[in-house]
């Protein structure tokens, strides 16, 4: 990278292999599930996840900022997703009663009904591509490993989502 | 889903949690690594992976179809990525000498030099967000689990990439 840096710590063969498997495996599975959902319902996995999160909270309403943190989205990407969903009547955006600068996202009754009708097909797809394929023990392992990546990744990921650079090597 | 189907096999709480951790964890990590790369080099992780794969084969040349299979790309997405890279001189597309219908993708000398110069920063990013965070044992576990998802997923993923529907429930 920049002059004067020490020799990079390359990945060894095993790490390299695992990293590539992760890249390929996660993309394959998520693409397959996303594709099933899109083909069956016209919705993306991102849109589906917004509906699920909203369906689980009181009033089926969540602040946009909290929703973004709960999901894998940057704020700008979430805004784009929600705008699209608003056009088809699945959600509405409303100003927060207790904070006029805040924006709430609410799942409509129509959105909730839609979620109910498509959930079985989506769960079957998640099972087929991931859960049943791995079996209970490995699925649990995967969850535990992934949890490590989000735990203290929060701050960094948030910084990345907002375009702040970190102490990485300069160009 | 459709009438007459049996009660869906919902995910239990543990499976549900693991599935969400996977969704969030993989997106967070890949977004962070992609963001680092983009900020430091202007290249996406997809573009980087194309360069790496080409750099490892004789003549730094691979058929587009083989390259797509090696990566996580549908053919159409790869075509888009490669076209962008061609504009900046990192790769060129050429017709296959032994099959006039086939198209090869070759990493140029400039592309190879560019890969060499950005690899250390990218490896540091992959370590920071994933490899060093998990440690050797869990990284290996992750690789093994992910390998299960690509092994026999090939055919299905390929079908999905080509827009063929499978025996999933009808709309």
Image (spheres, coloured by chain):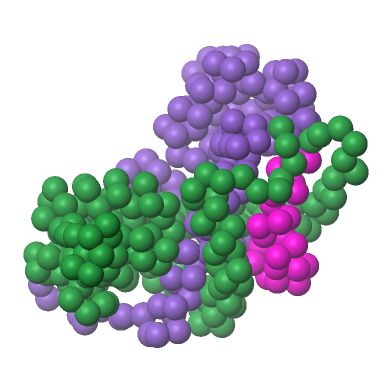
Chain colours: A green, B purple
**Towards the viewer: B71 or A110:** A110
- Which residue appears at 66% of the width and 57% of the height? B129
**Towards the viewer: A81 or A160:** A160
Q: Position of residue A21 (x, y in %)?
A: 63, 55
- Classify B112 as above or below A93: above
Q: Position of residue A53 (x, y in %)?
A: 30, 70
Q: Quadrant of residue A94?
A: bottom left
A26 sits to left or right of B167: right
The boundaries of the magenta stretch are B120-144
Q: Position of residue B152 (x, y in %)?
A: 52, 59
B152 sits to left or right of A114: right
- Classify B47 as above or below B127: above
Q: Residue furthest bottom?
A: B13
**Towards the viewer: B99 or A42:** A42
Q: Quadrant of residue B128?
A: bottom right
Q: What secondary structure predominates along the stretch shown in magenta? A: helix
- Which residue appears at 22% of the width and 79% of the height? A58
- Which residue appears at 71% of the width and 48% of the height? A167
Let me know if residue A101 is in the magenta part: no
Let me know if residue B132 is in the magenta part: yes
- Classify A81 as above or below A170: below
- Which residue appears at 46% of the width and 68% of the height? A130
């Amino acid at each position: 990278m920049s002059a004067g840096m020490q020799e990079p710590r390359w990945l060894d063969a095993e790490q390299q292999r695992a990293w590539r498997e992760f890249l390929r495996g996660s993309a394959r599975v998520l693409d397959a599930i996303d594709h099933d959902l899109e083909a069956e319902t016209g919705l993306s996995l991102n849109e589906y996840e917004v509906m699920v999160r909203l369906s689980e909270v009181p009033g089926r309403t969540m602040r946009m900022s909290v929703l973004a943190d709960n999901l894998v989205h940057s704020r700008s990407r979430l805004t784009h997703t929600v705008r699209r969903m608003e056009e088809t009547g699945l959600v509405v955006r409303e100003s927060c009663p207790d904070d006029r600068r805040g924006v709430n996202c609410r799942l409509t009754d129509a959105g909730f009904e839609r979620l109910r009708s498509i959930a079985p097909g989506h769960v079957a797809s998640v099972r087929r591509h991931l859960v049943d394929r791995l079996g209970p023990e490995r699925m649990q392992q995967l969850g535990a490993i992934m949890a490590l990546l989000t735990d203290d990744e929060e701050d960094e990921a948030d910084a990345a989502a907002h375009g702040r650079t970190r102490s990485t090597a300069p160009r």
